[in-house]
Each structure stands twice: as structure tokens, then as C-alpha cells.
Image (cartoon, rainbow, N blue to C red):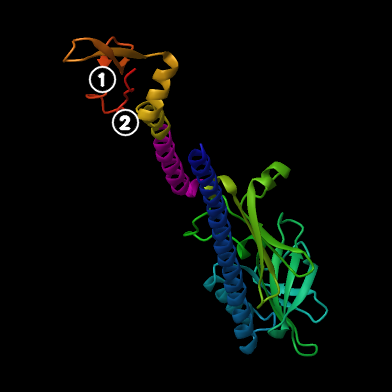
Amino acid sequence: MVGVFLACAGLLAFNFWLDWLVIHQAKEEVEVVAKRKVALAENRIGRVVKLVNDLSLRGLVSCRPAQLEALRQAALSVGLIKEISIIAADGQTLCSTLGSFAAQRKVLSSQRVATDSDILIEVIDIGDIDENMVRVRRLGAGNVPGLGIMLLGSRVVAHRSDEVHSLDAHGRATLQDGTLLGEAGAPAEGEDDKDDRLAMSLPSMRYGMKVSTSLPKSELYERASGIRSLGLAITGIVAFVLLAFSFFVPKRQRENPIAEIERALNAGEFVPYYQPVVDLVSGKLRGAEVLIRWRKPDGSTLSPAVSSLWPSPAASSST
């Protein structure tokens, strides 16, 4: 019983360890995806920052047709870009590569890039577009207009084609004040969905953003099904061994000579056999030697001379 208890406790501890391993592996996968998304967001913002700096160095900060055409060509060279605009010192958009526009750009939030104080990352609301836009803006010196490059907020955290969890991962990027830059993927719709997802948030040290990622637990645990299968297989094998052990131990106990003799004594299976002792000179009966015989339930009789079950020869003295 102690052995079975210890074995069951070991199996229970082993399965707890497997569950911990599955959860730990799932958290590691979420962390890997979160780091990948931070790197992706930094890469895309970094490409836009580099482009806005390059265009500013080329002096493309006016609304002259030739300069607007050069800006259009630059916009076409980077697939992420939706618009390049010339922005006055007061923040008003003077002209754009899209030509005339009906809706004015409304700045919802703005923060400076720590590595370049002349660069702003702004969240822009455009009335006829459902999602927020992200604008990387380089300030002009004095009254000189600046440049702004705009892209969809969802592209900051959008999935790449080789993303392992491209169908179920949810990404969300915000500024330091919590203003939403953009999100991509299916978010949790309720408390139950939130409980069924593993989430992680990591900061971007280069651009002051925070990128959050969540993945469904069911998908992560399914990827670890091999570990659970191994645990079930080991548990089944040990359970089979315990069952076989519990089956054969009683049988061995029944074949124990001491236990069998005790059972026979209680059942009255030992019977006395009297052997006469005769005086060879006078021919008179002097007494009897009492010997024990074991009459088994199947009718067979065992004597001390032939039975290996006796712990020692059983005989009594003459009377």
C-alpha cells in the first residue's frame, strides 16, 4: 500500500510538472511573438523615420509641383506609406501627395522620438477612415514647413507573411499616454475570451511605444499535445505495472509457507497419526509415537518427510 501510494504521488507530481511545462512553453511562445512584433513595429517606424530624414535633407519641403512629384515617387518606393505631406509650423497640412483632401487631419496624440528630438510620432484621425493613422513628422526649423509621412496604424503591428500565429495572434501598439496607434488580428471580445488568451506587453525603447500581444491558450496547448501524450503514455504504463503488482502480490502471499500453515491450523487440517512402539523381547506394547499428517482440502495427505512446506520436522515424544 505504501508503494502504491508513493507511486501515485509520483505520478501526480509528474503530471503537475508536465502541466507547468506546457504553460511555461506557451508563455515562452507568447514572449517570442511579442518580441517579434516589437521588432516589426520598430523596423517599420524606423524605415519611415529614415525616409522622412532623407527627404528633408533633400529639401523637399514645399508644395511646388516638381517637389510633390518627387514625394509621390518616394511614397511609391515604400509600400507602407499612404501619404506624404508638407506641414506648416502650426501643424496644418499645406499639401499632400494625394492631392486635394476634404477632411482635415486631427492630431489625437503626439510624442517625440527620444533618439531624435526633431521627430514626432503622431496619432491622426481622418474623418472618412475608420482606423487611426500614424504620422511620422519631422519639424521644420523656424517657420520652414516640415514633412509628415502617414501610414495605417494597423500596419505598425500587422502580421508578416511568415508569422506562425498569423490567424489568431492579436497585436496592439500604443503611445506612452495609452493612445492607440493601431491593432491587428482578432481581439478578445469578452471576459471569457480574455481568460482563454495569454497576453504579454513589451516596450519599444527606440520609439517609446508599447506593443501588446495575445494568443489563444487552446492553440498554444494544442501545439504542446506531444508533451501531454508522453505524460499520458507514462502514466498508463506505470498504472499497468501497479495493477499487475497488486494482482500478483496476493498470489505470492498465498504461497507463503508460514501463512499457509497458519491457515491449515485454523482449518483443523493437521491430524495425528499414532505409530505403536513394541518391545521386541517381550512383544508387549510399550507406547505410541504420534506423528502429524497434513490432510489438505483436496484429499491429499502430506507427511513431514515429503512436504517442503514444513518449517521443521514435526514429531512428538512417545507416551
The amino acid pointed to by label 1 is Ser
**261 relative to 54, above or below:** above
Identify whether 251 is placed above or below 187.
above
Residue on which disc 1 sits = 303
Question: How far is mark 1 from mark 2, CA to CA?
Answer: 12 Å
Where is residue 277 drawn, in percent x and y? 24, 15
Q: Residue at x 27, y 23 (%)?
A: 304
In the image, which disc is placed on residue 228? none
Nearer to me, 134 or 92 = 134
Q: Which residues are magenta?
A: 222-243
Cβ–Cβ below 8 Å for labels 1 and 2? no
Q: Position of residue 5 (x, y in %)?
A: 53, 40
Q: Quadrant of residue 66?
A: bottom right
Near mark 1 (Cα within 10 A), the count class, few <14, some 14-19 or many ≥20, is some
In the rendered image, which quarter is residue 78 located in?
bottom right
Q: Position of residue 125 (x, y in %)?
A: 76, 62
Residue 251 screen position, x and y as percent: 37, 27
Secondary structure beneath dot 1 equals loop
Instruction: Assign the magenta stretch its main secondary structure.
Output: helix
Name the residue carrying label 2. Answer: 312
Describe the element under mark 2 as helix, strand or loop. loop
Work out whether mark 1 precedes mark 2 in sequence or the reverse, and give the earlier one: 1
Residue 113 relative to residue 249: left or right: right
Closer to the camera, 278 or 65? Answer: 278
Does residue 146 show up magenta in the picture?
no
Q: Residue at x 66, y 58 (%)?
A: 183
